[in-house]
């Protein structure tokens, strides 16, 4: 039996890391499209007349279907019942369909007064497409997470998860760093189309991965022919939600990610309004966050694999996140270099927690329930990814009530004068630089992030205490000797 197992693809380091690389490219494409509009808030306001609430509505749409229709729970069950290959194809097709609708929102021509179900037509299609895309990318995320457990359990699992996250976050880095420049140089529709093309290539990558997965299943009789005792049943959901350790990790996840991912959406605008960064480079400093994780997440994952201390790593990352958001909040800190250093620290914190969090889930939840467990965690996370950006946009507009009406007023005047969208955007930029249109004040808004990080630190300590009580092994190495 040992000799037979040695012949499987899983035992080949080249094969399992190749499989990881193929899967990771699709997640790279998914993360790239997720952040495709993040650095464009100022440009969307001047080009299309969006308000902060409009922007908040669109970016919060990511979680609409996942949360209100419980799609993440449904796709998690589908993953456990239908398998990895079905889920790779289905998730990537949903991403492509949703991204196509979002592209139509910018490529289509809608009248200024066109509405659908009470939404501006452009806002409706951008939101609906992003909501559908959100189902696909989260479905892909849990599928890839379960695939990594399948290929790397008992081996370099935390390192593999860290490497996958690193490659995916390279996808976040690209639009944050270059998206505003590209959109100003070419156009916003072309920027969205670029993201869509990457997703189509990602779909093809998943098809290549499926050939490797099929071969592994053919070699590994235990995985290919599960007995009744190993099959997922709906009652297993009850086992998952009755596990206190699961809830600690799920709540830590939603609090931590809600204090980071919305920063991608509003961080570029903060850089423009607080630190004086030009709009076309608004996303460069926030892009340091995912760029730093590209190198650090696999590093910290390797430490967890070899040395353990998973719960302690999560505590350290949560504490660092509090310091970061306190510095962004303090009104007297406006130094550009301080913003750069702070973004680097945020990247370190954002490497620490996920590098330990995701490999810890298989220590708490049995493998046959992993798809549903990851889906439930992602579903809970999506409440934050949906709600926090919307709340931030609402609070930002309520605490800066004069800005959107002023932009709308001058935009209408320039349109009446026959100026093009690009000319209008330039004129409004001039008014901002002259102080005619004031800058956004983010002080009150940033208190939301501080509150989230404080709660995340408390949950991290509670998780470590539960691990000590139940003996999950979160402080133990992952590699089995």
Image (cartoon, grey):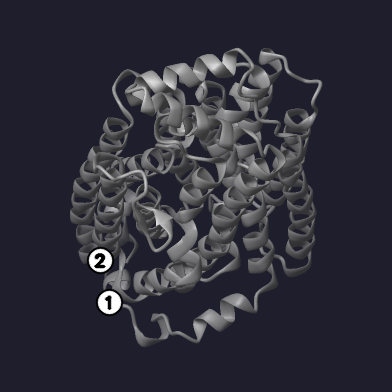
Residue 77 point in image, percent of width and height: 40, 75
Residue closer to the observer: 219 or 204? 204
Is residue 320 visible in this depiction of the protein? yes
Residue 47 point in image, percent of width and height: 40, 30
Q: In this view, does 391 lie above or below 365?
A: above
Is residue 150 visible in this depiction of the protein? no
Residue closer to the observer: 129 or 150? 129
Task: Tell me the tag on residue 225.
Answer: 1
Residue 62 point in image, percent of width and height: 45, 54
Q: Which residue is drawn at 58% across and 14% down?
A: 433
Q: In this view, does 215 lie above or below 479?
A: below
Residue 16 point in image, percent of width and height: 33, 47
Q: Is residue 385 above or below residue 26?
A: below
As drawn, is 204 to the left or to the right of 248? Answer: left
Measure the alpha-carbon separation of dots 2 and 1: 17 Å
Q: Mark 2 points at which residue?
A: 86
Q: In this view, does 93 lie above or below 40?
A: below
Question: Pointer 1: residues within 10 angstroms few (<14), some, or many (20+)?
Answer: few
Q: Residue at x 40, y 57 (%)?
A: 131
Q: Which residue is drawn at 60% across and 45% down?
A: 393
User: Could you say whether the residue bearing mark 1 is in a helix, strand or loop?
Assistant: loop
Residue closer to the observer: 121 or 267? 121
Figure quadrant of residue 277: top right
Q: In which quarter of the image is the N terminus?
A: bottom left
Observer-side mark, 2 or 1, equals 2
As drawn, is 2 to the left or to the right of 163? Answer: left
> Looking at the image, is mark 2 or mark 1 earlier in the sequence?
2
Figure quadrant of residue 187: top left
Count all numbered tags in the image, as a single digit: 2
Question: Pointer 2: residues within 10 angstroms few (<14), some, or many (20+)?
Answer: some
User: Could you say whether the residue bearing mark 2 is in a helix, strand or loop?
Assistant: helix
């Amino acid at each position: 039996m040992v000799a037979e197992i040695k012949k499987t693809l899983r035992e080949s380091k080249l094969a399992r890391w190749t499989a990881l690389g193929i899967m990771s490219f699709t997640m790279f494409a998914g993360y790239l499209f997720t952040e495709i509009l993040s650095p464009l808030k100022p440009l969307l306001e001047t080009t299309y007349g969006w308000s902060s609430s409009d922007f908040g509505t669109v970016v919060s749409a990511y979680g609409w279907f996942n949360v209100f229709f419980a799609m993440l729970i449904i796709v998690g069950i589908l993953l456990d019942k239908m398998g990895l290959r079905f889920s790779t194809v289905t998730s990537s097709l949903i991403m492509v369909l949703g991204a196509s609708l979002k592209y139509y929102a910018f490529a289509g021509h809608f009248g200024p007064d066109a509405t659908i179900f009470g939404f501006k037509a452009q806002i409706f299609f951008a939101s609906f497409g992003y909501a559908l895309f959100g189902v696909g990318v989260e479905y892909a995320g849990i599928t890839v997470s379960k695939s990594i457990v399948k290929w790397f359990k008992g081996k370099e699992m935390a390192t593999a998860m860290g490497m996958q996250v690193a490659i995916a976050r390279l996808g976040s880095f690209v639009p944050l760093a270059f998206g505003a420049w590209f959109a100003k140089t070419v156009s916003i529709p072309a920027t969205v189309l670029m993201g869509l093309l990457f997703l189509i290539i990602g779909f093809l990558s998943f098809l290549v991965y499926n050939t490797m997965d099929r071969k592994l299943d053919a070699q590994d009789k235990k995985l290919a022919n599960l007995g009744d005792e190993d099959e997922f049943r709906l009652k297993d959901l009850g086992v998952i939600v009755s596990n206190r350790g699961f809830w600690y990790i799920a709540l830590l996840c939603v609090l931590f990610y809600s204090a980071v991912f919305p920063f991608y959406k509003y961080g570029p605008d903060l850089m423009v309004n607080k630190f004086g960064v030009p709009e076309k480079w608004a996303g460069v400093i926030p892009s340091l966050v995912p760029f730093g994780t590209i190198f650090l997440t696999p590093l910290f994952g390797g430490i967890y694999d070899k040395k353990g201390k998973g719960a302690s790593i999560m505590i350290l990352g949560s504490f660092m996140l509090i310091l970061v958001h306190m510095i962004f909040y303090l009104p007297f800190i406006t130094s550009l270099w301080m913003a750069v250093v702070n973004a680097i620290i945020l990247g370190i914190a954002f490497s620490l927690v996920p590098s330990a969090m995701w490999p810890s889930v298989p220590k708490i939840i049995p493998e046959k329930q992993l798809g549903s467990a990851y889906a439930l965690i992602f579903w809970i996370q999506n409440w934050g990814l949906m709600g926090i950006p919307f709340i931030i946009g609402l609070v930002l507009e309520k605490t800066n009530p004069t800005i959107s009406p002023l932009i709308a007023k001058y935009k209408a005047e320039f349109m009446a004068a026959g100026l093009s969208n690009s000319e209008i955007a330039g004129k409004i930029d001039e008014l901002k630089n002259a102080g005619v249109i004031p800058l956004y004040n983010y002080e009150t808004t940033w208190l939301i992030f501080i509150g989230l990080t404080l709660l995340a630190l408390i949950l991290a300590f509670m998780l470590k205490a539960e691990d000590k009580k139940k003996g999950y092994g979160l402080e133990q190495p992952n590699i089995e000797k």
